[in-house]
Image (tube, rainbow, N blue to C red):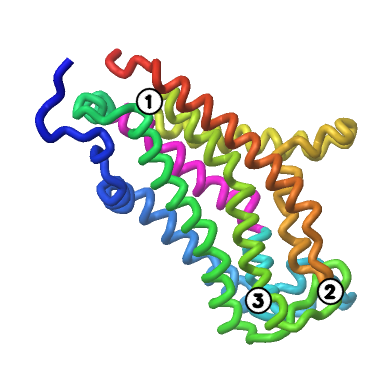
Amino acid sequence: MTTATGYAPNRTLPLRVEIVRQFKRRRTLAMFGLLLALPWVLVIAFQVGPQGVNDEPSLRISDLATQSGLNFAAFALSVSASFLLVVAVALFCGDTVASEANWSSLRYLLAAPVPRDRLLRQKLIVALGFSAAAVICLPVMALFAGTLAFGWDDIQVPGTGEVIPALDVLPRFGIVIAYAMVSQLVVAALAFLISTMTDSPLGAVGGAVGLWIVCTILQAVEALGVLREFLPTFWNNAWLDALQPELDWSGMAKGASVSITYAAILLAVAFRRFRHKDVVS
């Protein structure tokens, strides 16, 4: 079998081309617009809401949100990590291959010819890149908006009320954001797998989000006992341990191992299945 002169499989579908294609999509711009706007919506909600309704002091993360920009950033991440960021990651990773199949352009990409493994790898890298950007931009914008609205001050730890100097806690936000990205790997891998199995982008995104919701519901079933720790949602908020006076890695280590293991298995299945997928019919 002869190949065309100048054809090099490792030069097909360059990352820069895929990045530009995905960035110009309306859903990409709309999702980033929503993520960047949410902190400001929350600031307005706190500003116009009634103050001092509850005279008893509370140490819930929502009640401490206005104490400082750092507290507000932690609150914004806590309310978005369980759903909005899940939707964003599922959208970027679930839409990428399924949309090509839906537009009937997938067969032409493979006929270019782009090797199947390279096609998936390039799309996965770009999808994970946009997902990471989504997870990063929300808490960073929340920190900026919260600092402008509520000032730069030490963080008050939810639950205990202990105060930690802002400069001591700020570097830990890198750990918080990194763990938030790792915890979303299961959603990314699941959405990507479903995306290789269907030509419906909405089905891929909805399937990943739906299964995440099911895991969240099962997590509340205490009768499952220790089995709940194997659910990817169980460790979703383990990043709060990074904001304690004494940094505790145990919960984040367990959560990261569960997330990475599931993600590796799901991605392996996606690549294996796509190698034999019929993209013509």
Foreground tag (2 vs 3): 3
Q: Residues within 10 Å of mark 2 (few under 14, many from 20)?
A: few
Highlighted range, magenta: 79-103
Check the image and report above or below for 180 versus 138: above
Provide the residue designation for mark 1.
199
Which secondary structure, mark 2? loop
Identified at 38% across, 51% down, the residue is 28
Q: Quadrant of the C terminus?
A: top left
The image shows residue 280 at horizontal and vertical percentages of 27, 15
Identified at 58% across, 44% down, the residue is 185
Q: Principal SS element in the magenta part? A: helix
Provide the residue designation for mark 2.
54
Is residue 80 one of those drawn in magenta? yes
- Location of residue 69 (image quadrant): bottom right
> CA gap, disc 2 to disc 3?
30 Å
User: Is 255 positioned to the left or the right of 38 in the image?
Assistant: right
- Location of residue 277 (image quadrant): top left
The kind of residue tagged 3 is Leu
Provide the residue designation for mark 3.
170
The image shows residue 14 at horizontal and vertical percentages of 27, 45
The image shows residue 269 at horizontal and vertical percentages of 52, 24
Total of numbered circles in the picture?
3
Foreground tag (2 vs 1): 1
Identified at 80% across, 39% down, the residue is 229
